[in-house]
Amino acid sequence: MGPNGAGKTTLLRLIAGEFPADEGSIGYSGMTVGYLKQETEEIEAQKTVLEETIQAFSEILALEAEEHRLIEHMEAESDHETEAYHKVMMEFNRVHELLLASDVHLIKPRTETVLSGLGFKDSDFDRPLSTFSGGWRMRVALAQLLLRQPDVLLLDEPTNHLDIDSIDWLEEYLKAYPGTVVLVSHDRYFLDRMVNTTVELQQGQLTEYAGNYAFYLEDRTLRREHQRSAYVNQQKFIAENDRFIERFRSKASKATQVQSRVKMMAKLERVPPPPADEAKISFRFPEPPRSGRTVIEIPVFSKQYNSDQGVIKVFDKAGPLMIERGDKIALIGKNGAGKSTLARMLLGSEPFEGERIEGYNVAMTFFAQHQAESLDRRQTPLDALRSVSVASSETELRTLLGAFLFSGDDVFKSIGVLSGGERSRVALARTLASPANLLVLDEPTNHLDIHSIGVLTEALRQYTGTFVVVSHDRHFLDRVVNKVWRVEDGTVRQFDGNFSDYSWQVEHGTARAFIESGSTNGAPQSAGSSNNGKAGATTTTGAASGGGPKSKEQKRLEAQERELARKKQTQKSPSKLGGLNNFKLKNEYQRVEVEVEKLELQTKKMAAELADPATFANPSKSAKLLTDYETAQKKLASMNKEWEELASEMGSRDLT
């Protein structure tokens, strides 16, 4: 662990033997070392995925080629009694025994297993490497390294180019790995589950902690407190002795004591000052305008591409999907499943077969890695933010840039001289500086260190709008989302809760029952009673018998019933809105909106109190708080309904 620029990658390259040490030495004791770099190396383009990966067994393949050569040599000999023939046969026996001992028959299935675990399909094995992106070529390099099984495995950001499924597979693989694994990673979930020792690199010094990342954070705090206390106490001790020496230096009666203390101070081992606390950088989104309850709705939809391999179906009669105000949705799935495509469909920038219905007063903003390329290279990072956030002061803009690793004069550099990762961070900061009530973020944590991910996490937790985020950072998703959409096999399955809730459902709850049932039309009947209180999963390919989305026919019938009920109610008690003039309608809308915001703040404070165990130490107080909370919730629901009716009426009169 360590901040960006501390030297983590340099240390790995020293251990790997790529850099010579200026001083000291690095000993290997006969161990083999394998190193996965962050950047993709050039690979022979004409080779297929399988041909390149299987080169991990180059020594065995060389033996196999030698065996074939010896067989051809023996077949070419007509006289099998000659000494030359016997020498060839003896060599053949030696090579054959070595091949048997090396399990040559297993190298292809082992290679295919590792490639499958890292996300490659069977149909990808025979495709040329030139047809894959840098991220997929990096997976080939990782597969080679894992198959070689060096004694020491050095991995620099191994999860950067993997999807969630592949990261899960890699975790299990590395847990069973027979050698030592040294890794640099910003994936907290991966670190907490994987490592048993953490080493911090800071200011050129290494400090070891005997535990995972969570243990490291806790133990580092304790160590720094102890160091700070020892430092403060020693400074007091030094000051007292310095005063004594200075005061009695000229007194003959105290000369012996003064000399004794001077010698003691000279021999004193000084406690170094503790490291300065990391600057606490925080960022809050601009307050977004309030949207209607329904933000985006997409009924049944399909999407396909025409490619050299023919028609590729991304989604096939999937849906319906609905995003409501306040939803914090994670889009997960394998690479290539359609996550980014769905994100663009939600934004309205990707054409598809179906209908996209946008709600009232929706203001959207979008972040994707490629946006970094559209930045004006002549601008500075500060200029790029100022152009989209004219209301913010320079201090606020510099604070935001500081959260994304731009400090001091970095904010005045030309964007043209920044690296690809730095430009991506500028693009993300620029996106977040724009006020919007719907954010669609495609891999926002790429190129961020743990500290910056923490800043983004806290900002999203406090964000009052709605967002959809594509990410493979499971700790990040656990902290910020309340729904998970799994994109897979041409459809989208929906889960309530954060990533841990989703994982639980897949392993134990409704999702497992759904998978085992083999159904494609919704959760099984028993799903509701088998999840032990965890949120349930629904599928978007039809009516769910266990409480999932309803079919179009069901929805149509229910809509007809609601319309009939509304008409009957209108006949008994005509709506008051029709009798309001435009001026009064606007005033009423603003009054109700203010009331809704007050109630939301009130219920949020009550919920925080109810979440505090100390509240229940006073039974009468907690009982009253629960009653007040339920009353406020009911009132909020009623006021929300009234606000939506007013918003609808204003929309029909074109007053928005």
Image (cartoon, rainbow, N blue to C red):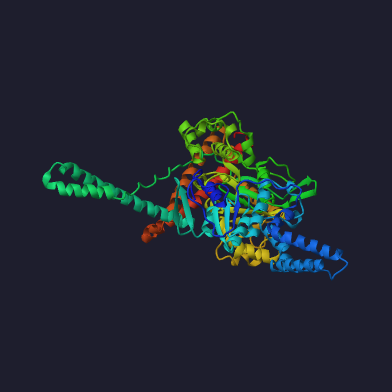
Residue 519 can be seen in this image: no
Q: Is residue 404 above or below residue 557?
A: above
Residue at the outermost left position: 253
* Residue 146 appears left or right of 193: right
Residue 146: give x, y in percent of width and height: 63, 58
Residue 282 at x, y percent in the picture: 46, 42
| Residue farthest right in this picture | 78
Q: Quadrant of residue 542?
A: bottom right
Q: Nearer the viewer, residue 100 or 651?
A: 100
Tag count: 0
What residue is shown at x 31% (from left), y 50% (from top)?
A: 269
Q: Is residue 530 visible?
A: yes
| Position in image of residue 360 (x %, y %) | 61, 40
Give whichever of 215, 305 is nearer the camera.
215
> Residue farthest to the top?
378
Q: Does 459 sit left or right of 312 as displayed?
A: left
Extreme residue in the bottom direction: 81
Which of the image's four quarters has the C terminus? top right
The spot of residue 101 in percent (x, y) is 69, 68
Nearer to me, 238 or 602:
238
| Up-down relation of residue 579 to residue 474 (above or below) | above
